Image (tube, rainbow, N blue to C red):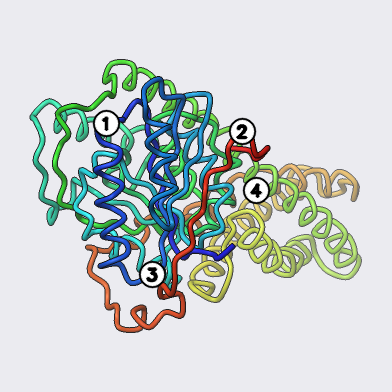
Amino acid sequence: MEKQTVDVVIPVYNEEGDLERSVRRLHGFLHGDFPWRARITIVDNASQDGTLEIARRLCAELPYVEALHLDEKGRGRALRAAWSTSDAAVVAYMDVDLATDLRALLPLVAPLLSGHSEIAIGSRLLPASRVKRGLKRELISRGYNLLLRTTLRSRFSDAQCGFKALRADTARRLLPEIEDQGFFFDTELLVLAQRAGMRIHEVPVDWTDDPDSRVDLVATALADLRGIARVATTGFRTAGARRLIRFAAIGAVSTAAYVLLYAALRMQLSGSAANTLALLVTAAGNTAANRHLTFGVRGRRRRVRHHLGGIAALLVALGITTVAVDTLDAVDRGASRALEVAVLVGANLLATVVRYRVLHGVLTPSSPPWRSNGHLRLERLLGHPDLRDGHVVRQMPTPESGGST
């Protein structure tokens, strides 16, 4: 079966009134004004009206239209099912009301196909966006995104706009980590992507509110609050805990190397000299290991700055351990070598805490990831080898055929 470049997913629940009109309009755009091969995947979330029958009919009539049926509701569940089985290079979704102007789809997808970004989202809150919606929804949207910035330190402007796209490899990486099956799916996806250091490209959109929206605002708000609380604590338990565990493991290895080197040097040098040389030798390896394994920093970018931070942490450790050695020498000049090493190990534990704070400040990005204003040079992309070249109809398997839906 021929692969498509972009798979646009439309999750639906009881949308028999809007589905056909919207799909035909989107299909006309994709196969008339869009420069890449594209497929539309309709995902029916346990509809109780004629939505599924309409979806099946559209599959039979229109090329590059597919339908899936799920027995349970949930936008996140629908996107997970469609994205995880798609063979496209880029997976996307939009709401069935097509509230977002379709002309934003090209700048949404372009940075993903160029390899510049992993995720692209439409944003109704960028200055260049043109939005028509009621005051209540405007306040709710801005309040929700402010809450995300406060509680989850989000750096994207609009979590819930129903207009998003991901590279397929990014989707495969993130989907197993997402727990939510409903509307909070979008937010959890973006928070996890941000924590992983992925680039989130934001596109200003022209967006018109659907006054006939079936979203239960109260139930959705409560579910979102529960999701925020879960993701906030999960982030602490997983990302933060794993980082501390890796740092501790590297610290243990570094401390063992330091003790062995100190003991060998102490046979020929004074305590302060042996301590200084042992720290110098182990500090570079400690910084390099933490840079790569603890904080996930790779490549040469800012490596000098990071190692300067490591030197600063070394100087702090040197000061703490030197004070410990000199104090022990003043209190008990004839202290045993075992007591001397024990005191230094304790001093190193204190220095390790300080080192973590220094390295965390140096190696953890403090500025937002690159964000564009939606404008991108497309000359190279318009010659992409995946320009559409034919029509293939992908039918939804029926229960009689034994296929899965």
Q: Which residue is mark 3?
A: 36
Which mark's residue is nearer the viewer, 4 or 1? 1
Q: Residue drawn 31% across and 21% down? A: 221
Disc 1 residue crowd, few under 14, some 14–19, many 20+, Cα 10 Å? some
Label at residue 352 = 4
Mark before the other along the chain sequence, 4 or 1: 1
Q: Residue drawn 34% across and 59% down? A: 201
Mark before the other along the chain sequence, 1 or 2: 1
Measure how far apart labels 4 and 3 are at the Cα level: 53 Å
Q: Residue drawn 54% across and 72% down? A: 303
Q: Are marks 4 and 2 in contact (CB under 8 Å)?
A: no
Look at label 2 and name its amino acid.
Answer: Pro
Q: Residue drawn 42% across and 32% down? A: 52
Q: Which of the 4 image quadrants contains residue 146?
A: top left
* x, y percent for residue 389: 43, 75
Q: Which residue is mark 1?
A: 144
Q: Which residue is mark 2?
A: 399
